[in-house]
Image: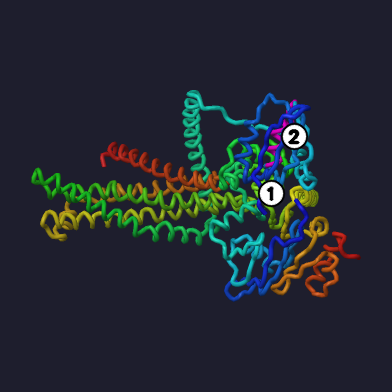
Amino acid sequence: MTYQPGWIKLAEGHDGALLQAGGAWTVEHAADLDRQVESLPKEAAPRALDLGGIEAIDTAGAWLLARASGQGESQEIPWQNLPAEFRPLAERVLMAGPKVVADRPGPRTILDWVADIGAGAEETYDQALNLIAFFGEFVLAAARVVASPRRFRWVPLLVHVEQTGINALPIVGLISFLVGVVLAYQGTDQLRQFNAQFLTVNMVGISVLREMGILLTAIVVAGRSGSAFTAQIGTMQVSEEVDALRTMGLDPMEVLVIPRVAALIITLPILTFFADLMGLLGGGLMYAVLVDQTFGQYVSRLNDVVTPTMFWVGMVKAPVFAILISLVGCLEGLRVTGSAESVGKMTTRAVVEGIFLVIIFDALFSVLFSILSI
Amino acid sequence: MPERSENVIEIRGLVNRFGEQVLHDGLDLDIRRGEVLGVVGGSGSGKSVLLRTIIGLNRPADGDIRVLGQLTRELDDEALRRLQTRWGVLFQNGALFSSLTVSENIQAPMRERGGIPPELMEELAGLKIRLVGLPVEAAGKYPSQLSGGMRKRVGLARALALDPEILFLDEPTAGLDPIGAADFDQLIRSLQQSLGLTVVMITHDLDSLVTICDRIAVLVDKKIKVGTLEELMRDPHPWIQSYFHGPRARAAGIAAD
């Protein structure tokens, strides 16, 4: 069945003006009807709204008719001749009451921007406090678990070791290998100008062992596993699983956080060791190609210039970075509130904060090592 | 709405199977315009799958489904989208978009359809909120700030956003307290009458069946038996007998003690 599109018009009669409406007053024609109603002359003051021509109506149409007749305002125009079959719907809509305008936020002023900066600073400060408090809680819970090792959850630990460690080997290895290649290539290129291309070995060895291996690994793990922790715990938070744990007397810290932190403390040093190897391998292959030496000569020279201290300087950072990344990931996961959007927001924050803290602590380590002259 | 005794939905020979398990085997069902049809059946009998099949979320293995005279499996994407604006669905847990406010949730189908000015969408969302009996303040809230009963009402308002002809409800009163459930039943009934809707509701609530359903469809033996409450009470099928004559049925005042 097809209807004529809805229309409304003002007709002048001998006993005053009369509004007439007809056709289909449905949501399909809403945009057009809205325009027609808005363009009616405001000062006309018709004596009634004649609805005899209405062919179809729905709530959107009834609403627009109510608006056209000034329902809920001082001058109401009475309705007449509405076909009987449309009356229940119209009454229902009119019963729902007059238009209520929801508060809309006003336009943003320069003051709002300033306020945003303040709010952002305050949030960052709160977040720092939160993280420190969370670290404290973690240490307490870890102490409890150490005191009664029966409470430690081995199966989740192994699952997380697999997910964060073994599964990350290919990507960590590939990235380190390529960075080693790039270091050797760029180094040789520059050092050749001074006829000192053999020093490339020192450069690759020191930079991979002290900085590149651990830093690249930590950044990849923050992106891979820190985000996974937030998403896993955050989704559990949304489906009230974390609350369920609490009601069973289980501490989310013990059940969710400690196995994840422990897993990263185990896997990050191993990944770093693997990254060191792959970085040195990539650097060596490139060196051998560019400087016309064998890979064996590279290895023996590496053996002369690299000390165990350099290796340990890199490795000692790994457990610290592991704690930072996993704690931030778990904390943001537990801070998820109620919605899918919140999971996404917190996951982004976990990665950004994780990488930021890794870089900050790396700088602190550099300061510390230079004071200790290592 | 004019009284017409036509069928808005006609299902013929519907077959649904998942792997080895056959859920529906040659199921026929007619749903008439302007009625409230309750769909009941044991757990796993395929009530939700039936609903999902009618609204096009599940492709049946065989059978014809005609909704508002159109054979759904022959429709292209565009025609299916147009048809979809003529029905509204209330999912079991509301399925509200958690990142949108109540008002934005209700406006979502209108926005998708396009062509409605923003102020009018805002007003219509407000109207829908009041039609389902929610306070106006609810408009700016997020679903996580609402109670379960309010979320259902928002879901209903969203299902009604485009003034559909058919309303599908999946266990509308599940999880509500008896008073809230009775209120919700009344709301559905009064909206159905005033807006001229056809309502298909999956329900386990015997009170709902008694108070608002015109006919009841029972899913047994992979097929459907449909009739009024009185007709079904006389049906000899054992599952139907125990359903309508069990202790809960007596509590709802269906069966005599």
Label 2 – label 1 distance at C-alpha = 31 Å
In this rendering, position of residue B1 left or right of residue A310: right
Can residue B254 be seen here? The reply is yes
Residue A288 in the image: above or below residue B220? above
Q: Residue at x 59, y 71 (%)?
A: B61
Q: Residue at x 70, y 56 (%)?
A: B169
Closer to the camera in the image, B203 or B216:
B216
Check disc 2: other Cα within 10 Å, few if <14, some if 14-19, many if 20+: many
Tag of residue A184? none
Can residue A337 be seen here? The reply is no
Q: Is residue A48 magenta?
A: no
Where residue A349 sits: x, y (%)?
A: 46, 43
Q: Residue at x 48, y 40 (%)?
A: A131
Q: Chain of mark 2?
A: A
Q: Chain of mark 1?
A: B
Check disc 1: other Cα within 10 Å, few if <14, some if 14-19, many if 20+: many
Tag of residue A49? 2
Quadrant hosting residue A191 = top left
Closer to the camera in the image, B92 or A287:
B92
Q: Secondary structure at mark 2?
A: strand
Q: Nearer the viewer, mark 2 or mark 1?
A: 2
Give the mark count: 2
In this rendering, position of residue A316 left or right of residue B150: left
Circle 1: residue type: Leu
Where residue B215 sits: x, y (%)?
A: 79, 62
Residue B235 in the image: above or below residue A319? below
> Where does label 1 land, which residue?
B156
The magenta span reads A61-74
Circle 2: residue type: Leu
